[in-house]
């Protein structure tokens, strides 16, 4: 994937003005912008206020002296920094020159050194943040007063399997509890897990959650909520484990004593209908659980 040199330079606090590009003939060398607000540190690297910034882009064909001479013929008066992202077929110390134009060429090694020093001193980050940061920010999804309305999946396949018609049902909202459960799974080893659990009619593990920006104005239908949920059986799972004689399925049991539970008041979009026998049903639109004779 090609490197966006302008984006990299801006990440390194290099200010680039891309207005009023000079008129030059199309070619390998293209205009990036004009340097502004040059810092003393950048000045030590050869950058100057108002210097025109150019690049060759990446490619297999090397930059030759004829290409530079042709470009320099059209280049405006002043200082120019040419970033060569490809190999150069000549000695940069013998680069072409023209009256009223001062040319500085950065080779691949110059670019690598510039970016490398920025990574080392922390100005450019190449590693992702630790996953702990993401987990820490997740509760911000529920900032402000609740209840929060979960986004439904709109999967009605279970109704089709049961011969039920969603078009004859009424959309409703169901008050529920959403738990963020963190704790230890214990089996042949130990593993910390974190799961979303929806408490509505029964307990359901959710792979992911999203919130609606605005809650629809619908009637509320109450369903049972477990006041003291036990997550041990729900979150226990069988995993493949190698004991040296092949892979075996072993139980990893969730240790309830290690559980840390955060609970949020939520509203679950659902559909309420009646089957051919007159029995009522509700389809929870988030977990896609069908509740008959609720």
Image: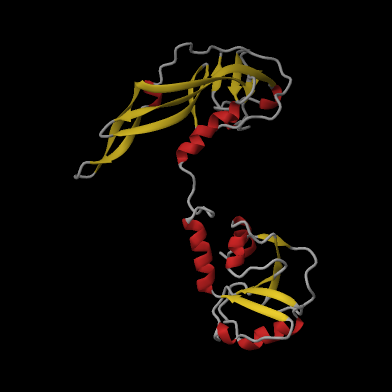
In the displayed structure, does residue 133 sit left or right of residue 236? right
Q: Is residue 274 visible?
A: no
Instruction: Pick the residue in front: 151 or 12.
Output: 12
The percent coordinates of residue 35 (x first, y second) are: 69, 65
Q: Write down the quadrant of residue 260 in the picture.
A: top left
The percent coordinates of residue 33 (x first, y second) are: 71, 66
In the depicted structure, whether residue 244 falls above or below residue 176: below
Tell me the colour scheme of the image.
secondary structure
For the point 41% across and 21% down, which residue is it? Answer: 231
For the point 55% across and 75% down, which residue is it? Answer: 107
The percent coordinates of residue 46 (x first, y second) are: 61, 70
Instruction: Pick the residue in front: 108 or 2.
Output: 108
In the depicted structure, whether residue 266 falls above or below residue 59: above
Q: Write down the quadrant of residue 103 in the picture.
A: bottom right
In the displayed structure, does residue 196 sit left or right of residue 248? right
For the point 71% across and 86% down, which residue is it? Answer: 98
For the point 52% across and 63% down, which residue is it? Answer: 115
In the depicted structure, whether residue 176 falls above or below residue 46: above
Identify the image quadrant of the N terminus: bottom right
Q: Can residue 1 be seen in this view?
A: yes
How many marks can you see?
Answer: 0
Identify the image quadrant of the C terminus: top right
Name of the residue lying farthest toward the left? 245
Q: Write down the quadrant of residue 148 in the picture.
A: top right
The percent coordinates of residue 175 (x first, y second) are: 61, 16
């Amino acid at each position: 994937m090609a490197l966006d040199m302008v984006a990299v330079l801006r990440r390194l606090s290099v200010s680039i003005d891309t207005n009023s590009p000079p008129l030059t003939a199309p070619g390998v060398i293209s205009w990036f912008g004009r340097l502004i607000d040059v810092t003393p540190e950048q000045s030590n690297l050869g950058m100057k206020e108002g210097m025109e910034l150019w690049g060759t882009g990446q490619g297999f064909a090397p930059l030759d002296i004829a290409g530079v001479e042709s470009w320099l013929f059209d280049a405006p008066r002043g200082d120019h920094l040419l970033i060569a992202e490809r190999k150069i077929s000549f000695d940069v110390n013998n680069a072409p020159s023209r009256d009223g134009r001062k040319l500085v060429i950065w080779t691949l090694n110059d670019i690598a050194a510039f970016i490398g020093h920025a990574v080392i001193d922390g100005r450019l980050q190449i590693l992702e943040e630790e996953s702990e940061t993401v987990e820490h920010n997740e509760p911000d999804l529920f900032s402000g007063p609740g209840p929060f309305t979960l986004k439904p999946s709109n999967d009605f396949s279970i109704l089709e399997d049961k011969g039920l018609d969603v078009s004859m049902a009424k959309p409703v909202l169901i008050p529920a509890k959403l738990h963020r459960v963190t704790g230890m799974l214990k089996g042949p080893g130990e593993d910390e897990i974190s799961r979303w659990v929806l408490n509505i009619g029964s307990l359901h593990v959710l792979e992911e959650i999203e919130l609606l920006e605005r809650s629809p104005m619908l009637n509320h239908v109450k369903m049972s909520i477990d006041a003291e949920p036990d997550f041990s059986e729900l979150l226990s799972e069988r995993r493949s484990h190698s004991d040296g004689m092949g892979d075996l399925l072993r139980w990893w049991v969730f240790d309830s004593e290690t559980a840390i539970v955060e609970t949020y008041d939520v509203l679950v979009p659902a559909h309420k209908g009646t089957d051919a026998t007159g029995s009522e049903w509700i389809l929870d639109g988030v977990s896609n659980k069908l509740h008959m004779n609720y």
